[in-house]
């Protein structure tokens, strides 16, 4: 039966077929004199041989057309309550002249016969949230009220709920048909709800409601999704619902006006995905051949996208200019596919431009041959499957890598937390028991030894076990947005410290944050000429150099401390820790414990002996917002006649909080005396009372507080050192300096210090490395069992070189004696080079050699950078 196509058509999928509904034009019947029109239906099935939809059968339902307008409102597949069979259902509208609107609900049977289920009349038109559900039944919204009618009652009933919108209608286990919608929050409706739910509804002004049609009762809306989403959700699809332990468990997806796709599990959002188009209006699902659940989202503009949920929600595909999208098993594969009907004004045939796909093996389209018995098409399908499988394998490998990284991060977090606990126990002088390596999933890098060396087996002593008193003073200052904590040390005659650093630990009471405060350590050395320098522990290690062993970043601090004791003010040095102030002020009042970490080395006969690590509790510092506001810890640099007065702690705080830059200024034509005039004049610098070579800048502006040190080596060369807050201040100072210098002056940034000093220190480091290698080798020989039987290096009187070689060679017996001695020395040499050692001795030797090599390598790097 060939019928003309009308502009308004309705498409519906049913049992793998496509049902096309449309109304014919009114025709005049001569016998009765009335006008009639027909509702036609065509059953279309997909033919895989021709890759086209063909008509299987058709039917018509004739009705009177004595109305102003007749149209199809909607169609859907619903359950017939009489038989329990799902049938196509069509809702028709007939508008009469007296503003009375008649609605007719029809059922379509497999014989293409239409059955009128019921009809009803209203004085208004249905326009909002029209839904067809089991019965068949019709539900709609009008004037913020819900109404419904079913084939059982044939009477329009109302739901006692004020409604803003309906987002879903379907079956819920043990409840029957349930309507899920949004309404204005009714705070006084129920008094037994918890305070959180009541406050949540009050904040957002809307709430979700669920109304069971059969039982006529309200369900808890938060079982589906939170009230906060009430203003943005436009449509919902309930994927799964079940009753577990008398509690409703619901899994659903929702689309919002914000172009978002959200997955909810038991009322809690579990995932979100950004949609590619605006104004999403509906969502449906499809279960494909690979057991993937696809979500099909339709938009008001005619666009469609598919969202997949595997590891996360993501848009899998999208199409534009889609007339309709249907879900069914159109190719008879036993799983569902998507049928996309595209808009095509050039072709008037039904189902002429389409695409059938499940985003996998099934892929048909109009005008493209996908016949499986064609070798070329079969090759395309096979290649496509292999490509998909390879991509899935790569995704799985990537997912495995991500899981391993996550496991590694969790392990690092456990180690960090355990270290924090150990540090807190150390501060509070409690014994800390470390968990076993197997419990933490770790493997020891060293073989277990029964008698480890002395330097590796001793535990770190607590503060109460350190009898020496070398902490002179603990102080704190506030410089800008930085807190500076300083510890003044006094070095005793039998004590040398290296690897010195400070830690700031919050007292107990802040369980939500880490107790360790991130800070930067600096060592400030001040000689009598106030040649100030600041060494940052985190900036002297060469970036490309790999650390051979974890030696706690010894670097070159031992050399720094070796040569500074004779030039210290009163034989003291200061270690500072600089940290950000604003995060601490968020707690209004905090108490921090200051820990000093160092290596204690005893001197005997002007040589360093074995060192051991120590941790000393220096004291506590209190910090409150009131004290900061009152300027209790502020730096005070005042003018006293022609000098700048300030306590030593104030000077050290400014140096610690500043960044140090050194510049070599060389002039070949004229002297560099304008630098001193520039400091005292334009920069308004005032020298410190204790040391005139260092000046404090009192100029108003960003440069205020900058400390300068100007040293002239000769009239044509000098060294300018700046301690400034940031790079902006540095650029301002250099810009001002260049304007007063002669054009022939050369200003060079010194990155790592003077070459002559570094060269001398490198020579000392290489010498120490050689001595370490020699001492380690001799210690190996002394502890070897065979060392007593060796004559190498111990009995010089028996060496061949000491015997008269000429006398031995005069006779045959002497020659034999010479050969015997030579053979003995060769054997002794081989034995001396093949001595075995214990694992503990090897660890100790490797640590010492690596420490010496790191120190020399670091100095080489700094020398190359200078």
Image (cartoon, helix red, strand yellow):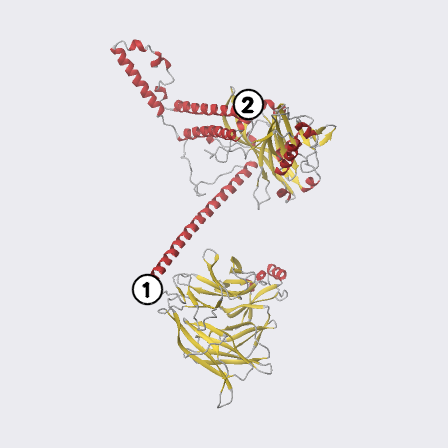
Point out which mark residue 494 bears.
Answer: 2
Decide: is 182 above or below 627. below
Q: Residue at x 45, y 30 (%)?
A: 850
Q: Quadrant of residue 201?
A: bottom right
Dot 2: few (<14), some (14–19), or many (≥20) neighbours within 10 Å? Answer: few
Residue 284 as seen in the image, left or right of residue 480? left
Q: Position of residue 609 (x, y in %)?
A: 49, 24
Decide: is 659 above or below 61. above
Q: Position of residue 233 (x, y in %)?
A: 56, 63
Q: Residue at x 52, y 20 (%)?
A: 606
Point out which mark residue 304 bears.
Answer: none
Which sits in the foreground, 772 or 348?
348
Which sits in the foreground, 628 or 73?
73
Residue furthest to the right:
641
Q: Position of residue 830 (x, y in %)?
A: 33, 23
Closer to the N terminus: mark 1 or mark 2? 1
- Where disc 1 sits, the SS reads loop
Mark 1 or 2, closer to the camera: 1
Query: Is residue 810 visible to the viewer in this orientation of the structure?
Result: yes
Dot 1: few (<14), some (14–19), or many (≥20) neighbours within 10 Å? Answer: few
Question: How far is mark 1 from mark 2, CA to CA?
Answer: 93 Å
Residue 386 as seen in the image, left or right of residue 75? left
Q: Position of residue 90 (x, y in %)?
A: 49, 76
Q: What residue sits right under mark 1 in the picture?
A: 374
In which quadrant will I find the C terminus?
top right
Residue 140 as seen in the image, left or right of residue 387? right
Residue 836 as seen in the image, left or right of residue 586? left
Q: How many marks?
A: 2
Residue furthest to the bottom:
31
- Where disc 2 sits, the SS reads loop
Query: Is residue 453 visible to the viewer in this orientation of the structure?
Result: no
């Amino acid at each position: 039966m060939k019928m003309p196509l009308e502009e308004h058509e309705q498409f519906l999928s049913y049992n793998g077929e496509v049902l096309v509904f449309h109304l014919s034009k009114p025709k005049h019947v001569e016998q009765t004199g009335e006008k009639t029109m027909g509702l036609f239906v065509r059953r279309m099935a997909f033919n895989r041989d021709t890759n086209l939809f063909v008509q299987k059968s058709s039917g018509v339902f004739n009705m009177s057309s004595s109305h102003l307008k007749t149209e199809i409102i909607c169609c859907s597949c619903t359950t017939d309550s009489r038989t329990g069979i799902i049938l196509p259902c069509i809702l028709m509208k007939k508008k009469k002249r007296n503003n009375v609107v008649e609605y007719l609900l029809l059922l379509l049977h497999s014989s293409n016969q239409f059955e009128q289920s019921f009809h009803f009349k209203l004085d208004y038109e249905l326009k909002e949230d029209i839904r067809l559900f089991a019965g068949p039944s019709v539900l709609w919204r009008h004037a913020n009220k819900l109404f419904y009618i079913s084939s059982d009652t044939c009477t329009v009933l109302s739901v006692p709920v004020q409604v803003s919108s309906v987002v879903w209608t379907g079956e819920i286990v043990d409840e029957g048909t349930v309507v899920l919608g949004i309404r204005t929050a009714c705070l006084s409706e129920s008094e037994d709800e918890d305070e959180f739910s009541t406050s949540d509804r009050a904040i957002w002004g809307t709430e979700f409601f669920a109304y069971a049609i059969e039982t006529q009762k309200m369900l808890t809306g938060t079982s589906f999704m939170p009230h906060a989403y009430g203003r943005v959700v436009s449509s919902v699809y309930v994927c799964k619902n079940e009753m577990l332990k008398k509690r409703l468990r619901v899994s659903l997806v929702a689309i919002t006006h914000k172009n978002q796709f959200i997955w909810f599990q038991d009322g809690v959002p579990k995932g979100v995905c950004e949609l590619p188009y605006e104004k999403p209006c509906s969502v449906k699902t499809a279960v494909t051949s690979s057991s993937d659940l696809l979500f099909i989202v339709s938009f008001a503009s005619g666009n469609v996208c598919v969202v997949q949920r595997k590891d996360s929600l993501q848009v899998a595909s999208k199409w534009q200019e889609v007339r309709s999208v249907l879900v069914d098993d159109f190719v008879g594969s036993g799983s569902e596919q998507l049928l996309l009907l595209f808009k095509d004004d050039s072709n008037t045939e039904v189902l002429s431009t389409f695409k059938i796909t499940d985003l996998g093996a099934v892929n048909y389209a109009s005008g493209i041959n996908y016949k499986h018995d064609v070798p070329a098409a079969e090759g395309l399908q096979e290649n496509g499957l292999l490509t998909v499988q390879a991509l899935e394998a790569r995704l799985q490998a990537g997912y495995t890598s991500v899981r391993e990284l996550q496991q590694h991060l969790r392990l690092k977090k456990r180690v960090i937390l355990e270290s924090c606990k150990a540090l807190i126990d150390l501060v509070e002088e409690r014994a800390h028991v470390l968990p076993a390596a197997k419990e933490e999933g770790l493997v020891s890098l060293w073989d277990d030894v029964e008698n480890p060396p002395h330097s590796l087996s001793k535990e770190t002593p607590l503060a109460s076990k350190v009898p020496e008193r070398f902490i002179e003073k603990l102080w704190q200052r506030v410089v800008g947005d930085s807190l500076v904590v300083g510890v003044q040390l006094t070095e005793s005659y039998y004590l040398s410290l290296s690897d010195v650093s400070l830690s700031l630990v919050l007292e107990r009471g802040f369980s939500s944050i880490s107790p360790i405060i991130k800070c930067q350590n600096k060592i400030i050395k001040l000689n009598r000429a106030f040649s100030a320098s600041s060494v940052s522990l985190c900036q002297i290690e060469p970036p490309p150099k790999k650390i051979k062993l974890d030696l706690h970043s010894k670097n070159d601090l031992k050399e720094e401390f070796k040569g500074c004791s004779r030039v210290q003010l009163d034989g003291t040095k200061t270690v500072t820790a600089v940290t950000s102030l604003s995060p601490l002020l968020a707690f209004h009042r905090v108490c921090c414990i200051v820990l000093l970490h160092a290596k204690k080395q005893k001197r005997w006969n002007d040589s360093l002996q074995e060192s051991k690590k120590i941790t000393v509790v220096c004291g506590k510092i209190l910090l409150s917002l009131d004290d900061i506001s009152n300027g209790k810890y502020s730096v005070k640099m005042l003018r006293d006649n022609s000098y700048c007065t300030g306590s030593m702690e104030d000077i050290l705080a400014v140096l610690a909080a500043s960044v140090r830059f050194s510049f070599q200024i060389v002039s070949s034509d004229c002297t560099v005396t304008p630098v001193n005039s520039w400091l005292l004049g334009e920069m308004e610098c005032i020298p410190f009372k204790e040391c005139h070579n260092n000046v404090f800048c009192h100029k108003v502006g960003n440069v205020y507080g900058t400390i300068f040190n100007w040293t002239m080596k000769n009239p044509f060369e000098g060294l300018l050192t700046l301690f400034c807050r940031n790079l902006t201040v540095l650029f301002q100072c250099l810009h001002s300096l260049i304007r007063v210098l002669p054009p022939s002056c050369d200003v060079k940034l010194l990155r790592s210090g003077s070459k002559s000093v570094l060269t001398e220190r490198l020579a000392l480091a290489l010498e120490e490395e050689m001595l370490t290698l020699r001492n380690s080798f001799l210690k190996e020989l002394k502890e070897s069992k065979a060392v007593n039987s060796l004559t190498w290096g111990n009995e010089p009187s028996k060496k061949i070189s000491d015997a008269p070689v000429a006398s031995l060679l005069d006779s045959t017996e002497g020659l034999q004696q010479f050969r015997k001695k030579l053979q003995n020395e060769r054997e002794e040499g081989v034995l001396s080079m093949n001595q075995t050692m214990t694992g503990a001795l090897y660890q100790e030797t490797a640590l010492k050699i690596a420490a010496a090599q790191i120190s020399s390598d670091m100095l080489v790097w700094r020398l190359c950078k200078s």
